[in-house]
Amino acid sequence: MASGKGGTGKTTVAVNLFASLIKQEGLSVTLSDCDVEEPNALLFFPGTPKHVQDVTASIPRIDKNKCVYCGECAHICAFNAIMFLRDPAHIQVIPELCKSCGACTWVCRHDAIREDEQKLGEISILEMGTHSLREGRLELGTPFTVPVIQKLKAITPNTEVVIYDSPPGTSCPVIEAIHDADYVIVVTEPTPFGLSDLKLMTQTLKKLGKTAGVVINKATPDHSILYDYLEKENLPVLIEIPFHQRLAAHYSKGHLFVDIHRAYHNMFRSLYTKICTQIHTGGRP
Ligand code: SF4
Ligand code: SF4
């Protein structure tokens, strides 16, 4: 579940698809909230999630009493995460750039580097019988979104259906969330901003070679602004969720659309059916 920008209703579609599928007999489903900077899928379901594990990383720390300022560690670091000056002598690790590869510790012949475990985020799970809802949450003030998503996906169970609710945009965390998906649902809205971000997302999906379809949220009777582009790119419209103030009010109270009216339940079931058909027939953007 992806969107070129925030606020289009990506999580709305993710939680409602999940809620409609867990009522389907014989199907096991996982929803993994990969929007780790502000996860909120758990808010829509009753129950207390269990904290499963912290996500940590080894970040090097330089002992300046042992360091001889040879610069070997900065030289080997492929991510420019060590700032080194020979004259005046200065060395400093930039944790935000570090990928915890361990090369600097390995190369230092003066035993001047130690690695500290730094908490990057945490994983929580709400078990729901054969289904589960999983959430990655980034530690406040840390920029390590990708490792938290990687850890969350690494512990996602082997259910028949797994829904990844991606962060918004088209940057690295989004690629991490969708790169191994069988199908990408792009949620958009019929506005010039929605179209602009949809174009960026379509370019990304083309590069990744992903099969994709579009959900139009807040649909109004005239959204030719989107249709012309979707037709040109051969992107199928899977469902359209109408723009209703009543729906927005329900959403703001944490209610699921599929619980409001049977018609929405059927709409999200049809979304799943269309995705299955698309996966079998191809339909790349
Ligand atoms: S390799 Fe070791 S001794 Fe050389 S600059 Fe880096 S920390 Fe200092
Ligand atoms: S652990 Fe790897 S990425 Fe981090 S500072 Fe050392 S060499 Fe660079």
Image (cartoon, rainbow, N blue to C red):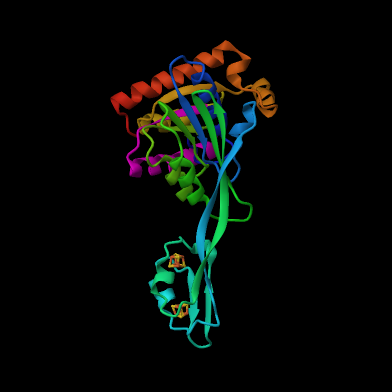
Is 253 situated above or below 193? above
Quadrant in the rendering for residue 219: top right
Q: Is residue 77 shown to the viewer in this render?
A: no
Most extreme residue toward the top, as rendered? 262
Q: Is residue 234 magenta?
A: no
Magenta stretch bounds: 189-216
Residue 124 falls in image quadrant: top right
Tell me the residue at 50%/14% (across/down).
Answer: 266
Residue 254 placement, left or right of 170: right
Residue at image position (39%, 20%) is: 274
Relative placement, left or right, of 235 versus 56 is left
In percent of width and height, residue 54 lies at: 56, 48
The spot of residue 189 in percent (x, y) is 54, 32
For the image, the number of numbered tags is 0
Above or below 275: residue 36: below
Q: Nearer the viewer, residue 139 or 2?
A: 139
Q: Quadrant of the C terminus?
A: top left
* Residue at 49 percent of width and 20 percent of height: 21
- In the displayed structure, 171 sits above or below 230; it is below
Query: For the stretch drawn in magenta, what is the main secondary structure?
Result: helix
In the picture as drawn, the residue positioned furthest to the left comes out as 281
* Residue 262 in sight: yes
The residue closer to the viewer here, 147 or 218, is 147
Outermost residue, front direction?
Answer: 111
Q: Which residue: 34% across, 21% down? A: 277
Residue 92 percent location from the top left of the image: 53, 74
Coordinates of residue 162 in the picture (x, y in percent): 44, 30
Q: Is residue 210 magenta?
A: yes
